[in-house]
Image: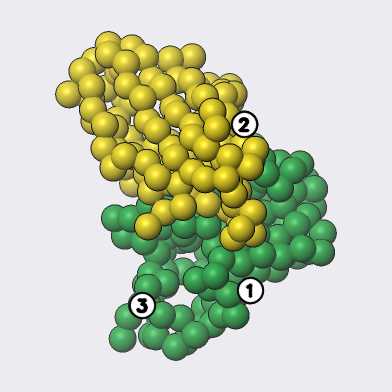
Chain colours: A yellow, B green
Amino acid sequence: QSVLTQPPSVSGAPGQRVTISCTGSSSNIGAGYDVHWYQQLPGTAPKFFIYANNNRPSGVPDRFSGSKSGTSASLAITGLQAEDEADYYCQSYDSSLSGWVFGGGTKLTVL
Amino acid sequence: QVRLVESGGGVVQPGRSLRLSCAASGFTFSGYAMHWVRQAPGKGLEWVAAISHDESKRYEADSVKGRFTISRDNSKSTLFLQMNSLRREDTAVYYCARVGSSWYNAFDVWGQGTMVTVSA
């Protein structure tokens, strides 16, 4: 059971918009700690994807955006493309655990 | 080119020890906090341990506390993870990752990972 809760899977057709939720609590996201997102393509290491809630590193398409509100965060993907198929993980810090925490991961399938 | 390269993984019997290394290049290693993150086969990411840029602070996940020790050698730009009393549930790919100037920054650089299999 992960401290941050994500849906195991989401899917959408090419061109559609999907969102991936990340639900935490008052000791992590709700405490004001930033949420970060990572993309993991099959058989590869995770990739730094969205940082500090809503910022994209260079090279990440602007089709991807992050948001945070209260004890939750979301990753939105518009104009879905086949190459977006991957696992996505949210991550933050938890003050009760005194450690860093990840969501369980969400597998995005492009239909 | 900023790079992290892990090594030291392999097959080890339960109860034995293993030491992982992570060689950094392309950036000033001594200026960054570093982490270990693992991923069991078919599972999600799990944070394992963290160390500050100057080794003054170290943190471990409850699942490895008392068994794993994170350390670093800034003169050699290398991060280590000493793993003792290994258990089957420690079987995973182990990644090292860099963190920016704040503890709460994202893990912005990752290695390719090294596989650890704990099996009799």
Name the mark on residue B85.
Answer: none
Give me the chain letter of mark 2: A
Q: Which residue is mark 3?
A: B88
Name the mark on residue A52.
Answer: 2
- Which percent across, then down, holds residue B117? 37, 72
Seen in the image, is B41 located left or right of residue B8? left
- Which circle, 3 or 2, is nearer the viewer? 2
Q: Distance of mark 3 from mark 2, alpha carbons?
A: 35 Å
- Which percent across, then down, holds residue A96? 61, 58
Q: Mark 1 or mark 3: which comes first in sequence?
A: 1
Mark 2 falls on what kind of element? loop
For the residues labelled 1 and 3, say whether their Cβ atoms are less than 8 Å apart.
no
Q: Distance of mark 1 from mark 3, alpha carbons?
A: 18 Å
Question: Please, is residue A73 above or below residue B10 in the view?
Answer: above
Asked whether B92 or B1 is in front, the reply is B92
- Which circle, 1 or 2, is nearer the viewer? 2
Residue with the most extreme left position: A111
Q: Which residue is mark 1?
A: B69
For the residues labelled 1 and 2, say whether their Cβ atoms are less than 8 Å apart.
no
> Which residue is at 33% across, 35% downward?
A86
Asked whether A81 or B62 is in front, the reply is B62
Q: Amino acid at mark 2?
A: Ala
